[in-house]
Image (tube, helix red, strand yellow):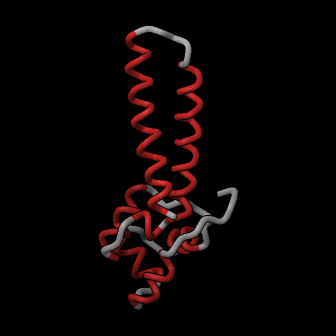
Amino acid sequence: MAQRLKVYLRTLRRRSGLTQREFAFLLGLKHGAAVSRIERSKRAPSLVWARASVLVFGTRARELFPGIFSEVHEAVLRRVYELYEELQGNTSKATRAKLDFLEEVLARLEGESQDAV
């Protein structure tokens, strides 16, 4: 990953008393090296690992991996704006439906941004 993203996996793992190897076992991995890379923000967790982490620690993925969620949120928001602008000027019914949908997405994403603050 290009920039260091906040990951709270290590904090929760240590608080629980689990070693990296033990936690890796719970995730279905053979060794703790992958856990170490995720904890040090050298690798993003797969969806399966993120979900397993949520189940083990009883928390939300957004709380475990806030940096990753923030990065994805910003990238999707930027692309929605870009597509919205690209579709402007087309008066077809299909395009109007797309623009309506994108407006809903923008409202939701902008609302989530404010919830995170």
Residue 33 visible in the displayed image: no
| Vertical arrangement, residue 101 with respect to residue 4, above or below | above
Residue 5 appears in which quarter of the rendering?
Answer: bottom right
- Looking at the image, which is closer to me, 20 or 75? 75
Measuring 58% from the left and 25% from the top, which residue is drawn there? 85
| Vertical arrangement, residue 106 with respect to residue 35, above or below | above
Task: Determine whether, in the image, residue 84 is placed left or right of residue 93.
Answer: right
Image coordinates for residue 81, horizontal then vertical, percent: 56, 34
Tell how many labels.
0
Measuring 50% from the left and 75% from the top, which residue is drawn there? 8
Residue 58 visible in the displayed image: yes
Residue 64 appears in which quarter of the rendering?
Answer: bottom left
Measuring 53% from the left and 27% from the top, which residue is drawn there? 84
Image coordinates for residue 46, horizontal then vertical, percent: 45, 57
Residue found farthest to the top: 92
Image coordinates for residue 103, horizontal then vertical, percent: 44, 33
Measuring 64% from the left and 57% from the top, which residue is drawn there? 1
- Looking at the image, which is closer to me, 26 or 71? 71
- Looking at the image, which is closer to me, 84 or 79? 84
Image coordinates for residue 27, horizontal then vertical, percent: 37, 69
